[in-house]
Image (cartoon, rainbow, N blue to C red):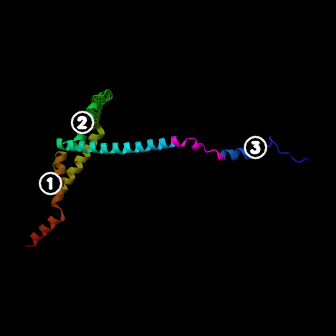
Amino acid sequence: MEPRQQGLLDNEALKEVDEDMVSEVDLNNMITDEEREEMQNELTKLEEEIATLKQVLDSKEKRHSDLKEKLGITPLGELRHNFSKNWNDVQSSTAYKKTSETLSTAGQKTTVAFSNLGTAISRKFGDMRNSPSFKSFEEKVETTVSSIKSKVGGTGGAGSFEEVLSSAANASAQNTPSNNVTESSENTC
């Protein structure tokens, strides 16, 4: 095997030379000293202008708040005013008007639907009350109430359902333990 000759076409030699040249070139240092000095002066002037503008802005903001204070404008008052203005803007928008109309229509339809539902339920309860099974149930309740009433000590006559419940409640109130104690203590005297 012949030893390899190094020459211009050798890749490794080219890589080393390229890397050395790139490291020697400073791309950031392509400005002259005069240009650098001008840029430094401009930067200094801009920083001074920014500081001046900040002072002017601070002064204007202080004057602004002093005037508001003298006029009686409070942050809460401003908030109310902004809210009121924004609310008026919202109410005058077409989207709000369309939504309001849609909700109004939906509310009316819902009211009618509930009214119809209430009427239907009332009719069904009326039909149910007139049904033979409900009549039979009602008679059994009246008979039971009459028998309870006669056992409690009331009259045997049947009254309305409300009267029977009222008399049953009165009868049970008379038989409470505190009343029994009072009665027994009266009997012993």
Compute the Cα span from label 1 to label 3.
Answer: 126 Å
Q: Earlier in the sequence, mark 2 or mark 3?
A: 3
Q: Where is residue 188 drawn, in percent x and y?
A: 10, 73
Count of numbered circles on the image: 3
**SS at mark 2 in the image:** helix
Three-letter amino acid code of the residue under disc 2: Ser
Label 2: how many Cα within 10 Å (few below 14, some 14–19, many 20+): few
Q: Earlier in the sequence, mark 2 or mark 1?
A: 2
Left or right relative to 32: residue 7 = right
**Residue sitting at 21 percent across and 44 percent down?**
66
| Residue 187 figure quarter | bottom left
* Quadrant showing the C terminus: bottom left
Residue wearing tag 1: 154
| Residue 150 figure quarter | bottom left
Q: 100 or 39: nearer the eye?
A: 39
Three-letter amino acid code of the residue under disc 3: Leu
Q: 101 or 28: nearer the eye?
A: 28
Residue wearing tag 2: 84
In the displayed structure, 20 sits above or below 128; it is: below
| Residue 124 figure quarter | top left
Q: Which residues are magenta?
A: 23-34
**SS at mark 1 in the image:** loop
Left or right relative to 71: residue 118 = right
**Residue sitting at 45 percent across and 43 percent down?**
41
Q: Tags 1 and 3 in contact by the CB under 8 Å rule? A: no
Q: Is 112 contained in the magenta span?
A: no
**Residue sitting at 49 percent across and 43 percent down?**
37
Q: Which mark is residue 14?
A: 3
